[in-house]
Image (cartoon, grey):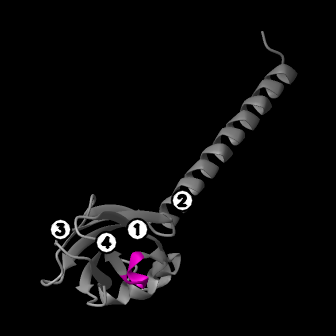
Amino acid sequence: MLKKKEFSKIYLAGLFLLLIIISVLAALIFEKTTIDNNQKIITLNLDTKVEKNLSWNFSTINNSMEVKIGQLYKIDFNVENYGSSKSSGKAIYIINPKLLKKYFVEIDCFCYKKQTLLPGEKSTYSITFYIDPKMISDSKVNDTKNMSISYTFLDSKKG
């Protein structure tokens, strides 16, 4: 039979072990909640267009992707001059909803400069970007689940 002292030791050890388990579970739940709140995801839809008089094909492999706020991304675009002469273009873009433009941070983009392709030439252009985490604290846009960016190559005529 267990003596009172032995029972007290077992009881205290069990209580101590239970407190450790509860503390670890509470820490794990808190960490998961914090990670979930800081990793908001929105769907980014990409659209590619080319001005009529520019004989180029312009596309990307993924027209839609899940983007974690604050994470760095690189997207490649395929471009081909299917015309019979050298031509140049410069890309412009539009972001919708427009309120998200200030949170779309480009680190590098092919659209900053004129691109020139020889007849039949193919190339890959890229954009490196992230969505600023400050978006999460902006009550006007923090519930946004979708963002669209439309890139259009315009004829630069100066080849």
Q: What residue type is labelled 4?
A: Lys
Cα–Cα gap, marks 1 and 4? 24 Å
Residue 82: mark: 3
The secondary element bearing badge 4 is classed as loop
Tell me the mark number nearer the camera, choosing from 3 and 1: 3
Q: Mark 1 points at which residue?
A: 126
Q: What residue type is labelled 3?
A: Tyr
Q: Do the residues labelled 3 and 2 touch (CB within 8 Å)?
A: no
Q: For the N terminus, which image quadrant?
A: top right
Q: What residue type is labelled 2?
A: Ile
Counting from the top left corner in percent of width and height, residue 98 is at: 32, 89
Tell me the mark number nearer the camera, choosing from 2 and 1: 1
Which residue is drawn at the image coordinates 16% and 76% (left, top)? 55
Counting from the top left corner in percent of width and height, residue 11 is at: 75, 29
Cα–Cα gap, marks 2 and 4? 18 Å
Is there any visible trace of residue 4 in the rendered image?
yes
Q: Name the residue under label 2.
A: 35
Q: Mark 4 points at which residue?
A: 145
What span is in magenta?
A: 110-114
Camera-nearest residue between 22 and 131: 131
Instruction: Judge whether 70 appears above or below 95 on screen.
Output: above
In the displayed orientation, state which residue is furthest to the right.
5
Mark sitting earlier along the chain (3/4): 3
Tell me the mark number nearer the camera, choosing from 3 and 4: 3
Q: Residues within 10 Å of mark 4 (few under 14, many from 20)?
A: few
Which residue is drawn at the image coordinates 48% and 63% (left, top)? 39
**Picture quadrant where residue 31 is located:** bottom right
Cα–Cα gap, marks 2 and 1? 29 Å
The secondary element bearing badge 2 is classed as helix
